[in-house]
Image: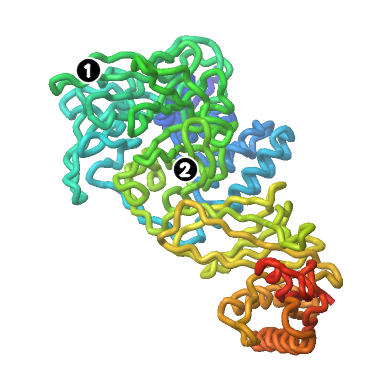
């Protein structure tokens, strides 16, 4: 009888292999279960084990990439989305998520390539892809500019292994959100999404010298068992507005992230975390009387991130309630005479975009700050400011580098208006956590309001200025080689960001007009907005252009200091339009004799030409011509009684394009 003999070591190896595969399947099953329940951090723990024992299948690769994205671990997300985009039949959205991870990690060139692939794979998103590519290019420019602030991690408060964010003024300190756990001796339930305790409110006091007390959890009457976050206190310290997360069991589209800044594209989640605003009243040093905000409606939408104005009359917040323009918008509610809150109003399309606007803050002067991923930014959420009030805002401005980074930046507050404050960011964290940073503004922002105007003459031969639309303006900073090209709108206007203490050069061009240049030297004491005008003349042969404010002393032709300033503008015009030649002409009024006025006008015209030559203009481009009183622009001839103002119109200096 013949028997087949299997060596014992092969049996052991097979059993070991089977055991490894079985263990890998067990870890994978647990990981998938956690993933399906939005416990991404716990899912990753098991995915990491499973892939050490078995090569991951495409579905597992996709889930690992998504889990790293949802926990904001951008470097690991980049690694796994690089694999996901190579999978057969890969979801085209992976190009987008890969680009976002690359951008967050400062790999701008690679990010632009992936945005392009996303737009090609999903043509309905092509326009958005181009906007993101443009925003990425702008982000590159921001990182290359001189820093406008000093930003330092507040290590006395922030704990590296936990998230700390959204500081807000609270008495002689701050109130902020953290998932560090309420106390070391109390068992803290782990939130599966992050693998850390639930979000709760903490306070810390300062001595005003940069020293902070140890953070303390707010009384448990405010800190419920689930998430409590993003608070705002009334200036008298007796009332607190804060956010709670409510888990709703529904099968409809929603966002299960309690902080609402991570997008979840899931048509049928089993649970939806929605936000609500609550108030707490302080009586005899104890917080109590916790009441819901009138307009909470967790069965349909979220309301959270409250921000109370300094006078306590306006409450700003974030919501996706009906009337939203994007994923989440900034809304506001006015306090009524009876103390109740009025119906929420959308803050408007200047603030809100199709993306996410959240974490509003209003400083002592009423200036609005908020976080957004819909306005052009450096990556993730960026912090923006706006001027105005309620639903009427203008001048939305990205606060730039280093207030903003390539990752999430939000939750700003000022300790000294416009100068120092705190913000939250995950810029330095590889594990997806946020930290609180202090900042000091080095260069204060200013809005440069550019006006492009055309010089014309009215029926009375007076110069007038009218808006000139669609003018291309190249703006450059004096100490930086880089420049920005903008276009004035139909009203001849363009608003751009600048900084006090800087000098900007503006070069405007439009077909059929002389190229114009202006310098804007912005003092440190400037207001919030600086007006800069570019005045254009048509480039037409024999066109006469009257120079304003060219005056001479009686019976003299010397170039006065005030006249020199006007002639310097003409020097700039000639330098920027080297193809033109001009006739420089001088005119007098009718008083005095013909010969006297003719001689005087010739001397003044020659003096003007000599001045231009002294400034480097080739004399071959210039012709001096005195016309005396032969070309009066009105009826103020000999023996005609006229006012001094009317005579002044005839005493003019002009140049004519030849």
The image position of residue 455, as x and y in percent, is: 73, 61
For marks 2 and 1, give the one nearer the viewer. 2
Whether 126 is drawn above or below 480: the answer is: above
Count residues near mark 1 (Cα–Cα under 10 Å), then give few for <14, some for 14-19, many for 20+. Answer: few
Residue at image position (59%, 47%) is: 135
Q: Is residue 245 left or right of residue 209?
A: right
Give the number of callouts: 2
**Residue farthest to the left, as pictured:** 284
**Residue at the location (77% across, 63% down)?**
461
Give the vertical position of 655 relative to 380 (above or below).
Answer: below
Quadrant where the N terminus is found in the figure: top right
Residue 127 sits above or below residue 475 on the image: above
Residue furthest right in the image: 541
Instruction: Give the alpha-carbon distance from disc 2 to disc 1, as whole Å.
Output: 34 Å
Colouring convention used in this rendered image of the protein: rainbow
Residue 67, placed above or below residue 224:
below
**Label 2 sits on residue:** 385
Q: Residues within 10 Å of mark 2 (few under 14, many from 20)?
A: many
Between 65 and 244, the one nearer to me in the picture: 244
Residue at horizontal 79%, vertical 64%? 538
Please provide percent x and percent y for residue 460: 77, 60
Q: Position of residue 566 (x, y in %)?
A: 63, 74
């Amino acid at each position: 009888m013949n028997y087949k003999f299997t060596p014992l070591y092969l049996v052991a190896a097979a059993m070991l292999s089977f055991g490894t595969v079985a263990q890998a399947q067990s870890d994978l099953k647990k990981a998938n279960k956690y993933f399906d329940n939005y416990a991404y951090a716990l899912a990753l723990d098991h995915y990491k084990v499973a892939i050490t024992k078995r090569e991951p299948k495409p579905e597992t690769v996709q889930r690992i990439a998504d889990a790293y994205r949802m926990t904001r671990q951008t470097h690991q997300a980049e690694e796994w989305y690089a694999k996901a985009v190579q999978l057969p039949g890969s979801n085209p959205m992976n190009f987008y998520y890969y680009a976002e991870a690359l951008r967050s990690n400062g790999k701008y060139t690679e990010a632009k390539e992936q945005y392009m692939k996303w737009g090609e794979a999903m043509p309905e998103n092509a326009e958005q892809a181009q906007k993101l590519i443009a925003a990425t290019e702008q982000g590159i420019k921001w990182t290359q500019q001189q820093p406008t602030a000093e930003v330092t991690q507040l290590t006395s408060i922030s704990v590296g292994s936990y998230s700390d964010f959204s500081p807000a003024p609270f008495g002689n300190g701050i109130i902020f959100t953290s998932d560090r756990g309420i106390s070391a001796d109390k068992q803290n339930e782990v939130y599966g999404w992050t693998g850390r305790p639930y979000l709760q409110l903490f306070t810390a006091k300062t001595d005003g010298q940069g020293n902070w007390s140890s953070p303390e959890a707010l009384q448990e009457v405010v800190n419920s068992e689930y998430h409590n976050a993003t608070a705002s206190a009334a200036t008298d310290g007796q009332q607190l507005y804060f956010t709670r997360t409510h888990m709703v069991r529904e099968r409809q589209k929603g966002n299960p992230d309690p902080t609402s800044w991570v997008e979840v594209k899931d048509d049928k989640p089993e649970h939806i975390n929605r936000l609500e605003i609550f108030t707490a009243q302080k009586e005899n040093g104890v917080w109590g009387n916790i009441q819901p905000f009138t307009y909470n409606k967790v069965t349909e939408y979220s309301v959270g991130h409250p921000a109370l104005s300094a006078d306590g009359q306006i409450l700003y917040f974030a919501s996706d309630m009906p009337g939203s323009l994007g994923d989440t918008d900034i809304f506001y509610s006015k306090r009524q005479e009876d103390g109740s809150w009025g119906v929420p109003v959308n803050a408007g399309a200047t603030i809100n975009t199709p993306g996410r606007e959240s974490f509003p803050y209003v400083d002592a002067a009423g200036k609005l700050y908020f976080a957004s991923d819909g306005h052009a930014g450096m990556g993730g959420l960026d912090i923006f400011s706006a001027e105005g009030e309620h639903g009427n805002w203008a001048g939305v401005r990205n606060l730039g580098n280093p207030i903003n980074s390539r990752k999430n930046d939000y939750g700003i507050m000022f300790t000294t208006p416009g100068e120092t404050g705190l913000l939250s960011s995950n810029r330095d964290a590889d594990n997806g956590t946020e930290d609180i940073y202090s900042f000091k503004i080095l260069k204060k922002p200013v809005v440069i309001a550019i006006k492009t105007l055309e010089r014309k003459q009215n029926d009375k031969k007076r110069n007038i200025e009218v808006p000139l639309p669609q003018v291309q303006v190249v703006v450059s900073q004096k100490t930086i080689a880089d420049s920005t090209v903008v276009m004035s709108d139909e009203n001849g206007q363009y608003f751009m960001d600048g900084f006090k203490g800087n000098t900007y050069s503006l070069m405007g061009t439009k077909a059929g007009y002389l190229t114009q240049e202006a310098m804007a030297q912005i003092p440190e004491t400037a207001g919030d907005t600086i007006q800069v005008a570019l005045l254009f003349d048509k480039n037409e042969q024999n066109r006469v252009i009257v120079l304003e404010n060219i005056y001479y002393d009686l019976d003299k032709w010397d170039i006065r200091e005030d006249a020199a300033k006007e002639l310097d503008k003409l020097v700039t015009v000639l330098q920027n339009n080297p193809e033109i030649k001009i006739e420089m002409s001088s005119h007098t009024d009718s008083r005095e004799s013909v010969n006297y006025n003719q001689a005087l006008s010739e001397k003044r015209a020659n003096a003007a030409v000599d001045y231009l030559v002294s400034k480097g203009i080739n004399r071959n481009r210039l012709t001096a011509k005195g016309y005396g009183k032969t070309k009066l622009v009105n009826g103020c001839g000999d023996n005609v009684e006229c006012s001094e103002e009317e005579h002044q119109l005839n005493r003019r200096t002009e140049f004519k394009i030849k």
